[in-house]
Amino acid sequence: MTAPAIEFREVTKVYKKRLLGQEIAALTNVSFEVAQGEVCAFLGPNGAGKTTSIGLLMGFHYADYGEIRVLGEIPGDVRAKQKIGFLPENFAFYKYMKAPALLKFHAQLAGVPAEQASKLIPDLLYKVKLNGYEGLKISKYSRGMVQRLGIAQALLSDPQLIVLDEPTSGLDPAGRKEVRDTILALKAAGKTIFLSSHILSEVEQICDRVIIVDRGRMVRSGTLEEMLGPGDRVEIVVDQLSEEMERGFVESGATVERKEHGVHIAAPTGRKRELAEMLWAAGCDVVSIVPIRNSLEELFLKVVGDGAKPFGGTPS
C-alpha cells in the first residue's frame, strides 16, 4: 500500500516566550493525511497555524508532540528533502539575472548534475510558459511570470510533493489563471500538491481535498465533494417568465435573474417539483433543473466564523 504524501498525527507545537514566561499553542492535536497524487488546499484565517504546519512538514522546525511523515520520511531528513519542491509566499530572486542562469544556480543548490540541469531547464521554462523569455532579465518580468519562475525553481529536482504557500498572492486575474493552469498541469502529471491560499474561488477549481484549521486546531477535512456536497437549493432555467409569476416567486423566497439565454430561478430543493409544475402549467419551457452546490467560501465562513477574511492579509 502506498504511503500518504503527508501524515500529521496528533501534532502539537508550542512557542515559548522565555522573557515573558508565556506559552502560545500554534497547533494542538492536529491530524490529517494527504494521499499521493492529490491537490490539497490547506486553509484557515490569519493566525490559524498554516505557516507553522508548513514549516513542520518542511523540517524548518519540529513538533513538540505527535508524529509527521512526508512521503514516508521524517521531515528534515535528506531523503524527504530530495522529494519536495517548495515555493514560499515571500521569496526574492536576483532581479538582474535571467531565468536560465537563475535556475542553473538553484539546480546546483539542489544537487542536480550540471548535464541533467542543462536538459531540464528548457523543459521547465516551457512547462511554466516562460520559453521565449530566456533573454529577459527577471526585473522585467510581470508578477505572474516571477511566480511561475518560482514554481519552475520548485520543480528542479522533479519532486513528488510540491508545497506552495499563497502561490497566487498579489496577482491579477490573468496571473492567477497562469499559475492555476500550471498547477493543473502538475496534477495531470501525477504530482502531489499541498497549497495554502486565501483565494477560495480558485481553490475550489483545482483541489481534490480541503483541510481547514482555526486557532491551531483542525476544524474540517475531506474531499471537496464530501465538504461541499449537494446544496439545499436548485436552479430552474426557463425560456420565459411573466412579471406576475416572478413577483410570486420572489415573495415566496425564491430569487429570479433574467439573463440573455433564459430566466434563472433559485429556490429551495423541496419546492422544485411544485415550481416546475407551476411553470409548465403557465406555458413556460423548463430548460433545466440543477442542484446548486454550496461554495467553499460559504463553508469556510461557517466553520471558522464570519470574522475570518479569506481574501486578504498575511497567512499564518
Image (cartoon, rainbow, N blue to C red):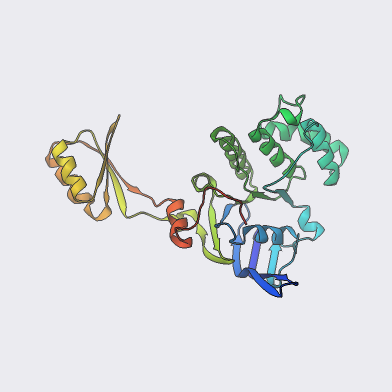
Q: How many marks?
A: 0
**181 above or below 234?**
above
Q: Residue furthest bottom?
A: 21
Q: Which residue lies furthest to the front in this view?
A: 20
Q: Is residue 258 left or right of residue 135?
A: left
- Find residue 43 and report its horizontal and vertical position in percent: 56, 56
Residue at coordinates 63% horizontally, 44% vertically from top-left? 167
- Find residue 236 and report its horizontal and vertical position in percent: 26, 43
- Find residue 103 and report its horizontal and vertical position in percent: 79, 37
**9 above or below 226?**
below
In which quadrant of the rendered image does the C terminus lie?
Answer: bottom right
In which quadrant of the rendered image does the N terminus lie?
Answer: bottom right
Camera-nearest residue between 24 and 277: 24
- Find residue 188 and report its horizontal and vertical position in percent: 60, 42
Camera-nearest residue between 216 and 105: 216
Residue at coordinates 61% horizontally, 57% vertically from top-left? 35
Residue at coordinates 54% horizontally, 55% vertically from top-left? 209
The image quadrant of residue 121 is: top right
